[in-house]
Image: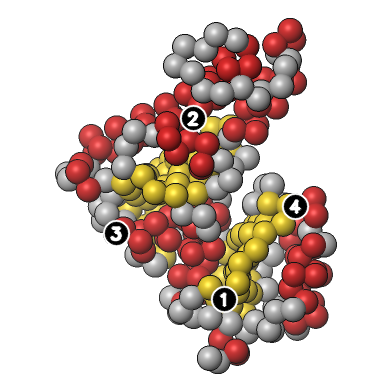
C-alpha cells in the first residue's frame, strides 16, 4: 500500500465534522467530532499516517475553516476546499448559480450518482434537511431545504408558549398527548416533504420503477421506518463524494 496516496477527506457540517482516511480503494479509518469539540480531532489524527492530500467540504463558516487549517498544519499538506460547479464527475447542475449550491450537497449528489446512475433523490437529514433531485442522465434538477429534526424541536420548544415541553414523545398516527403530537408532527413534516419530492421526480422520470432515495445525515434513521418508498441509508455520503472528486483528476479545488 502506497502511504503517499492517502487522502484525508473532511465533511465539516453545521453540527459535526466527519472525516475519513482513504487509500484510493477503500476507507482505512473514519471518525467524527462535534463542531463544538474540534480539538478532539487533534488526538484522533495524531495516530494517522500523513496523508498526501486533504480535501474538505465546509459549510460551517470561516472559524471552522481556520480551526481545521490549524489542526492540519503538522502534516505540512495544503488543504483544498471544494465548491459546487456546473459539471463534475458525471453530474451537471441546473442551479441558477452553480457555485452557490452547498458544497456538501454537491459532493453527496456526486456520490449518489456514482452509486446508482439513475434517477434518485439525495436526502441529507442534518441541521437542515435537503432533498435534491437527480435525473436519469445525472442532471441535478434542483432541491428543497427545510429545518431538520433538531431545528424543528428547538423551534417548537423554544417558542411554543404553553407547548414548550420536551419533544421526547413517540410517533402516533393520531397522537393523544402533546409530546407525541410534537414528535409525530416533526416526522410527518419531514417524511411528507421527502415523499412529495419523490412523487414530483416520479412524474418527471421515464422509468419510475427504478427510482430510489439515498439518505444520509444524523437524522436519517429517524425517518427510516416512516418512508414508504424505496430507500437506503448511507452514513458518509459526502465523504464518498469527496473521495470520488479527488480521484477524478479534475477536482475543481479552491482555497478557503
Q: Earlier in the sequence, mark 2 or mark 4?
A: 4
The label number, if any, that marks residue 51 in the structure image: none
Residue located at (46% from left, 79% from top): 25
> What scheme was used to colour the molecule?
secondary structure
SS under mark 3: loop
Residue located at (49% from left, 18% from top): 172
Q: Earlier in the sequence, mark 3 or mark 4?
A: 4
Residue 190 left/right relative to 134: right
- Identify the image quadrant of the C terminus: bottom right
The alpha-carbon separation of the residues under discs 2 and 3 comes to 25 Å
Residue 58 left/right relative to 210: right
Residue 89 left/right relative to 124: left
The alpha-carbon separation of the residues under discs 2 and 1 comes to 34 Å
User: Label 3, on which residue?
Assistant: 117
SS under mark 1: strand
The alpha-carbon separation of the residues under discs 2 and 4 comes to 24 Å
User: Label 1, on which residue?
Assistant: 28
SS under mark 2: helix
The alpha-carbon separation of the residues under discs 3 and 4 comes to 33 Å
SS under mark 4: helix
* Residue 79 on image: x %, y %: 67, 73
Foreground mark, 1 or 3, reads 1
Q: In the figure, 41 relative to 129: above or below?
A: below
User: Label 4, on which residue?
Assistant: 35
Q: Determine contact: label 3, label 4, CB under 8 Å.
A: no
Q: Earlier in the sequence, mark 1 or mark 4?
A: 1
Q: Earlier in the sequence, mark 2 or mark 1?
A: 1
Q: Earlier in the sequence, mark 1 or mark 3?
A: 1
Amino acid at each position: 500500500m502506497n502511504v503517499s496516496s492517502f487522502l484525508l477527506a473532511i465533511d465539516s457540517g453545521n453540527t459535526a465534522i466527519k472525516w475519513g482516511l482513504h487509500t484510493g480503494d477503500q476507507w482505512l479509518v473514519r471518525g467524527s467530532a462535534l463542531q463544538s469539540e474540534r480539538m478532539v480531532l487533534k488526538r484522533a489524527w495524531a495516530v494517522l499516517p500523513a496523508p498526501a492530500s486533504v480535501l474538505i467540504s465546509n459549510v460551517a463558516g470561516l472559524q471552522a475553516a481556520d480551526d481545521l487549517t490549524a489542526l492540519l498544519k503538522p502534516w505540512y499538506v495544503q488543504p483544498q476546499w471544494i465548491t459546487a460547479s456546473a459539471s463534475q464527475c458525471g453530474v451537471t447542475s441546473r442551479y441558477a448559480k452553480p457555485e452557490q449550491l452547498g458544497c456538501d450537497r454537491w459532493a453527496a449528489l456526486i456520490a449518489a450518482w456514482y452509486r446508482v446512475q439513475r434517477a434518485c433523490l439525495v436526502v441529507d437529514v442534518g441541521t437542515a434537511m435537503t432533498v435534491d433531485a437527480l435525473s436519469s442522465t445525472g442532471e441535478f434538477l434542483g432541491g428543497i431545504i427545510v429545518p431538520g429534526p433538531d431545528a424543528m424541536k428547538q423551534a417548537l420548544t423554544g417558542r411554543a408558549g404553553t407547548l414548550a415541553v420536551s419533544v421526547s414523545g413517540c410517533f402516533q398516527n393520531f397522537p393523544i398527548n402533546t409530546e407525541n403530537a410534537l414528535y409525530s408532527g416533526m416526522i410527518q413534516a419531514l417524511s411528507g416533504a421527502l415523499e412529495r419530492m419523490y412523487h414530483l421526480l416520479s412524474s418527471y422520470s421515464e422509468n419510475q420503477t427504478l427510482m430510489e432515495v439515498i439518505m444520509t445525515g444524523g437524522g436519517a434513521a429517524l425517518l427510516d421506518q416512516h418512508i414508504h418508498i424505496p430507500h437506503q441509508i448511507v452514513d458518509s455520503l459526502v465523504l464518498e463524494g469527496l473521495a470520488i472528486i479527488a480521484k477524478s483528476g479534475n477536482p475543481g479545488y479552491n482555497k478557503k
